[in-house]
Image (cartoon, grey):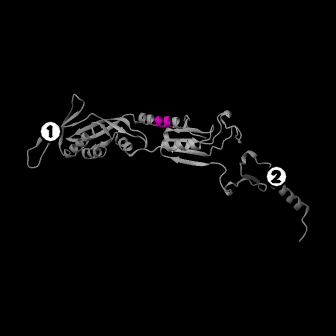
Amino acid sequence: MSDPTENEVQSAANLGILVARPDGLDPAQIGAGQIGVRLPPGARYEVIDLTRYAERPQRKVGTASFETVDGFCAYVKTHGEAGRTTVWAKQSALTVTAVLNGPAAEVDALPPDALVPPLAGWSDHRAVLTLRRTPEWEAWVSKSGAWCSQHDFAEFLEAHAREVVNPSAADMLDLARTLDVKKDAAYRSAIRGDTGEIRLAYDETVTARAGQAGNLSIPAKLELGLTPFKGAPPYKVEARFRYKLKEGSLTLGIVIDRTELIDEEAFGDVLAQVGTDTGITPWHGSPA
């Protein structure tokens, strides 16, 4: 084997210097339990994480997910770092996010024995509360503004009578059954009574008997008790009855006004509970 040339010796020496001295890597990019390695010329720098080979993690990381306010608040109180925990709310996504190890808002808020730089924070330990809609809320909101046949509307009222506060659920069941029984009647006119209820006049043909006339009364509006999110209390919601008469056929529907305001109130109540239970006032927005 021939001896290396002078150029080959110099190239090897230069490569050794590059590997031994990673002077182009910012030390701030290297965390605890990591090493920085500079690869041969033209390659990128690498940060190798050795913490996964340790007996246990050196700090808390990851994201915990919750569907109830109580569970979210309990986790934040247990794992949030003093002076470094922030809470962020985003109503459009129905989420509340807590960053448990973010930058310190104030140096004075840090524990006196803190070993980390005063304002630094990894921000990689989080808790996320995702509010879930209740089936009852989704059912009524989806029905709002839609027209239904008597039969379909009667089935809906029967299935959701328990969410009606006024008139009573029993009255709603009676109305549902009457609507279903009278679905083949020919409706002639509609008159609004002194109490606001709507009286629908109809003619009905009964087998083996002469036809008979009658009136069907429906309330002008309903007072509902609906829970927008799972685990939240019910809210008072007002729904207005609508009807259409065409060639003796009756079509029914409801309209729920300004559901976005009820949503906003319910979400605000969630944030108020989070602030009370954790002692941290939520910010509106998303964490970095």
Q: Specify few, some or many for label 2: CA neighbours under 10 Å numbering under 14, 14-19, or 20 or more.
A: few
Name the secondary structure under disc 2: loop
The reply to whether residue 135 is in sight is yes
Q: Range of the magenta residues?
A: 267-273
The reply to whether residue 284 is in sight is no
Name the amino acid type tagged 2: Arg
In the rendered image, which residue does mark 2 sit on? 21
* Residue 187 vs residue 142, the one in the foreground: 142
Give residue 110's position: percent from left, percent from top.
67, 37
Name the amino acid type tagged 1: Gly
Give residue 222's position: percent from left, percent from top.
30, 36
Q: Which residue is at a point 14% across and 38% down the rendered structure image?
A: 214
Quarter in which the C terminus is drawn: top right
In the rendered image, which residue does mark 1 sit on? 214
Q: Which mark is on residue 46? A: none
Q: Specify few, some or many for label 1: CA neighbours under 10 Å numbering under 14, 14-19, or 20 or more.
A: few
Give residue 64's position: percent from left, percent from top.
55, 48
Spatial separation of the CA atoms under disc 1 and disc 2: 97 Å
